Image (tube, rainbow, N blue to C red):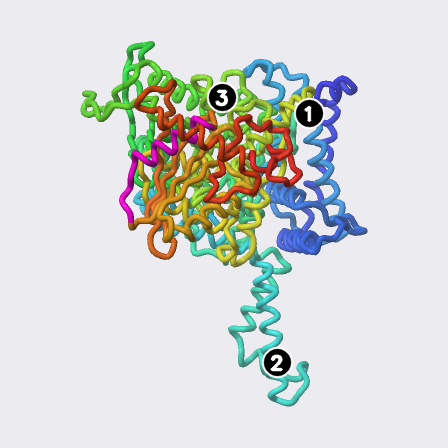
Amino acid sequence: MQSSFAGKRKDAPSSMLNEMERIASRMRTIIVSMPPEDLLGYIYYQSVRLAGVKNEGSAEDEDSDGSIGEIDDFQFLLEYVHAVLASDDAPDAVNFDEEKVSELFELSRKLRQEAMFYAMASSANTTHHEFGPDTADLEFHAKSSWVVLRGNRYQVLESEFYRFVLAPHDDILREVYGVGAAEIAAGIQDITNANRTGQADAVAKIGEQFEAAKKYALEKGKALEEVMGDWAAENSDEIEAARSAVEDLLHGGIANVSRHTDLPNKLLEDLAYERGEDKEFFADGEFSGTPYRTLPARKKPLVKLGTDYFAVDLCLFRDAGYRALLFNMLERRPDYKEPFKERQKIMSEGAFPEILSSQLPGATVFREVYYKDPVTRQWVENDTLILLDDVLYLVEAKAGAAATIASPALDFKRHAQSIKDLVLKAYKQCERFFNYLNSADQVPLYNRVNDDYQEIGRIRRSDYRVMIPIGLTVESFCPFSTYCKDLPAINPLLQKHGFISMSIDDLFVIKRILPTAGAFAHYMEVRQAVAAMKHAHLFDELDHLGAYISRNRFDMDIAQQLAESSNAKLVIWDRMGDVIDRYFEGENWEANPIPKQEFPEELLKLLKALDETRSPGWLFVDSLVRNYGEHGRRDIAKWLSEAVKTLDEKTERYFALDNDGELLFIWMQSSKIATNWQKINDQATASALYAKLPAAGLFIEVGNRGSYVKAEYFGINPPDKKTADNEHIYAEAERIAQRMKEANAPHSPDKPNLPARRKIGRNDPCPCGSGNKYKKCHGR
């Protein structure tokens, strides 16, 4: 697409650049001529109109004056409002002109569109080669993201994020600004809330005061106009509140952080431009005033208007606030630079197990693991190793900023270096550790103490069914975090284990959506499978999470799409994160139901019992259960429920299921009887012999009123040949075969549901009679 576009217009980049500069110049002229508060109020008003149109499901996305478009259009325009206010002194005379604002909306859309075309055309003919044949694609991603990507976090989680990442510097923040991490985080959340709900709050406040005045008039028995003066005199506080609400609603007051937060002026001053302070954005030269210069908001997200400070667009604060705050703190305390780096390192390396503590119950966590590289024979280090049952997480944390503030159009090499520093370095460090694990049956791990290395444990690769290498950044690094798998230097480690790049931002969302160890581990398994698929693109971690909630084994769906479309070079799933977005919407978002996969109640009981028992191998069998699709989950729940009902009479029951070539044998028994493991193992082994499939066992002990007292995994190892010691198992396998041959009715716990000898093809009709292909039904 890019090459053909450039072929038609070889002069495209230069002509587009000229057009961008022309449009930007006209936008600057209009913006500087307007009273900024009125302009902001009008833009915010139009954004509320747009939200109303979208919420009502209207097909009409534009009105006659062209003043309403997409949310991204508003955010892009607000960046330019900030840029002009930061770059130009306030003129002596300003005048609000609605026709010019309508023109401004149209110019903004054209500039954004032209910038995207430029990203395509200029990247197609790139002279850069930092990433081999994929450099052009990566350069396009860098340029297009630079233009359109902003605010890629959930507003309601700002306090949580800032409180965590600023906590290491609490004492210095108090010395410099007089407030610590918690107060700054709360202040930033106040700013966010004012922007998020300020207009609705203002409308409610005005309506409340109007109703109070009407009630007053009714009590006096006079017309409202007659008593307004008296009511105002008696209710001065309410009048002031109403005046403030009007300011918020019509004059950009929701952006006035001086009114909506208690953050000290000294801190706000460090994060804000004075009018006309920035001399670079509109300076003469290539890309003057275009989105490919570094917008002032990327350096300082606030602007000072009169005596107050304004967050012109909330996304500007969210994208640049963290880096700007740390930069200015270090400017005021240059002696803190070295301690700062060490504290950042400790914070980032501990973030994964600390934030996800509920998802890693009882995990063994090693920090700063040392070992001798078998290739170089030098001591090397990895950040964080987490061992939980048969799952291994290796986390390489990068404490620096997620991206450079230099434009990719002006300095692509710096962007390339950011990707190498934040992704490739972490990948290489993970690769080195995985190679070390693979160098021997068992390898030692060390801590470094006073220049000496002390062994802290030994580890076997064979003990871990799942091994997940993770590169962790502080801030979101999308789309590069998900795109990086297509770089030629990144391949599954040991040809099996896909590398995942994610951020601390992502962790705060994941911990809410996947609250248990089993749900998190299964998501990471599926996520890793997609991370190992080149040319399968989801935009960010939230799209992956949404796809998992909506589709469960979405890795299998993508693999099928890639396999079935022989001509397809790329599979893109878009807007999969919408299900996650909706959860965080609304003033009372915490009351919203958490997005989750649906499980029948009986299966939830089973998963809870596995989580509480946590015997070795529990995450493996938990994963097997979660692999089932909707129909399969209902069937297991039905069989479990029926078996539980009859345990008082029969005391023990069993059945087995085939899920895409893997047998799950389930044994249930009453807690009133002793466990006969010989009997259980014999029956499970006979079932596996009959099925001729890899098999896993699940033992469930049932207590009073059908409660699951215990649920644990056990291994099944069928013999290779018949002997005198195991001939009874072979005989039982034959009896199973005979029973299955005779059985025609649907199976119940009395007639164990064992798989047929012939493996069902994924494209065969599902034997359940649904009419769907097996891969879309019980084979999921």
Q: Is residue 680 magenta?
A: yes
- Where is residue 537 drawn, in percent x and y? 59, 29
Q: Which residue is mark 2?
A: 229
- Tag count: 3
User: What residue sits 47% from the left and 25% below the top?
Assistant: 692
Residues 499 and 36: in front is 499
Task: Determine whether, in the image, residue 251 is placed left or right of residue 371.
Answer: right
Task: Determine whether, in the image, residue 720 is placed left or right of residue 39.
Answer: left
User: What residue sits 69% from the left and 52% below the top?
Assistant: 54
- Residue at mark 1 to residue at mark 3: CA–CA distance: 21 Å
What SS does tag 2 mark? helix
Q: Which mark is residue 186?
A: none
Identity of the amino acid at label 1? Met
Identity of the amino acid at label 2? Gly
Q: Are marks 2 and 1 in contact (CB under 8 Å)?
A: no
Judge whether residue 335 can be spotted in this image. no
- Tell me: residue 519, above or below residue 117: below
What SS does tag 1 mark? helix
Identity of the amino acid at label 3? Gln
Q: Which residue is mark 1?
A: 120
